[in-house]
Image (spheres, grey):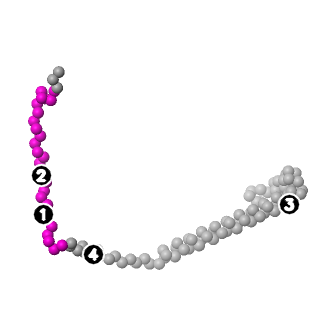
Amino acid sequence: MNIFGIGPAELFLIGVVALLVFGPKKLPEIGRSLGKTLKSFQEASREFESELKREMDRAEAPASTSMTATIEPPAQPALASSEPATPVTPAEAEPAPAAKTNAVDSVDPV
């Protein structure tokens, strides 16, 4: 019988050391509280597993049903008025020529 990789001899040694450290009066209380803690841990573990399984089943249920969707054609935009829009004149294709300057003009006199 191995519990967490600990054999009967090791369990006996741990029990003797615990008896020496805590004493015979305190040892049953410690054992009870340790047992309650382990029981609550096991219950929480079982609850977690059942909740996880329930959520997995719930997630698989919609995936198994066939998915169908209808796509509606886009609506045609209505014209705001019956008058045609005013034509837009294109901008100038070429920029205006830059003013010519000489290198001598741009130097400050000293």
**Separation of residues labelled 2 and 3 (CA atoms):** 99 Å
Q: Position of residue 33 (x, y in %)?
A: 79, 61
| Mark 3 vs mark 1: in front | 1
Name the residue carrying label 3: 28
Q: Would you say residue 41 is visible in this rendering?
A: yes
Task: Residue at 47%, 78% (x, y): give it.
Answer: 65
Q: Which mark is residue 87?
A: 1
Instruction: Give the magenta range.
Output: 81-107
Q: Which mark is residue 92?
A: 2
| Residues at marks 1 and 2 touching, judged by CB atoms closer than 8 Å | no
Which element carries disc 2, helix, strand or loop?
loop
| Mark 2 vs mark 3: in front | 2
Task: Residue at 13%, 65% (x, y): give it.
Answer: 86
**Separation of residues labelled 1 and 2 (CA atoms):** 16 Å
Whichever of labels 1 and 4 marks the residue nearer the N terminus, that label is: 4
Which element carries disc 4, helix, strand or loop?
loop
Whichever of labels 3 and 1 marks the residue nearer the N terminus, that label is: 3
Q: Position of residue 51 (x, y in %)?
A: 61, 70
Which element carries disc 1, helix, strand or loop?
loop
- Amino acid type assigned to the residue bearing label 2 in the image: Glu
Whichever of labels 1 and 2 marks the residue nearer the N terminus, that label is: 1
